[in-house]
Image (tube, helix red, strand yellow):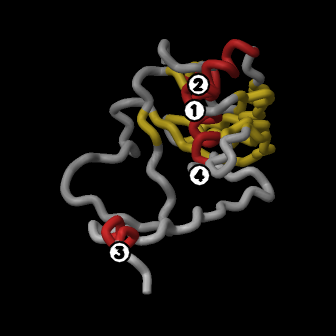
Amino acid sequence: MKDAAWSQPVRLAEVGRGSLRRTLVPSEAERERIARELNLVKLPELSAEVDMTSWMDGAVLRGRWRARVVQTCGVTLDPFETPLSGEFEVKVVPQGSPVAPTEEGAVELDLEAEDPPDVLADDRIDTAGYVVEHLALELDPFPRKPGAEFEAPEPEPETSPFAALLQLKPRS
């Protein structure tokens, strides 16, 4: 958590047997670090509401976030701004939890099944880390400014080693 661009830890014990709500808004310096981490030109706005409730021996995080990102258009190379928003739900458990996923055997992938809970490295939940992770998932990996269209260059005429010789030949 120490080298994260933005961190807002909550101790698992704070969630306890109830619920907890956090409003998260990074400072300008934190937004600049997030923008560098996500390869953005700029991150003018980011905010989130994260609700945490107890679940088994861990917690469930339900978050809603909004952002404005500035990316570079892959066609024109101009910077442009895009509003983004999203929601997420993540379950977390402490190390050694009986409901923690195990690494034993072959892993079967079921796209319809719920994601397994994340296992915490210590007793802290980095709420801001989950917000940044879900923002990153929403970014267009090939950003294109609205209205920008790629125009293929005209193909060059085919050249051959004999093209220069043909120009020297007298025309009849």
Image depth: mark 4 or mark 3 in front: 3
**Mark 4 vs 1, N-terminal side:** 1
Q: Which residue is mark 1?
A: 39
Callout 4 secondary element: loop
Q: Say above or below: 125 vs 153.
A: above
Structural distance between the alpha carbons of marks 4 and 3: 50 Å
Image depth: mark 2 or mark 4 in front: 4
**How many numbered marks, from 0 up?**
4
Q: Which residue is mark 2?
A: 36
Q: Quadrant of residue 78?
A: top right
Q: Which residue is mark 3?
A: 169
Q: Nearer the viewer, residue 75 or 111?
A: 75
**Mark 1 vs 3, N-terminal side:** 1
Structural distance between the alpha carbons of marks 2 and 4: 17 Å
Give the residue type that dot 3 points to.
Lys
Q: Are marks 2 and 1 in contact (CB under 8 Å)?
A: yes
**Mark 2 vs 4, N-terminal side:** 2
Structural distance between the alpha carbons of marks 1 and 3: 56 Å
**Mark 3 vs 2, N-terminal side:** 2
The residue positioned 47% from the left and 70% from the top of the image is 157
Q: Are marks 2 and 4 in contact (CB under 8 Å)?
A: no
Give the residue type that dot 1 points to.
Asn
The residue positioned 43% from the left and 87% from the top of the image is 172
Q: Which residue is mark 4?
A: 142
Image depth: mark 3 or mark 2 in front: 3
Give the residue type that dot 4 points to.
Phe
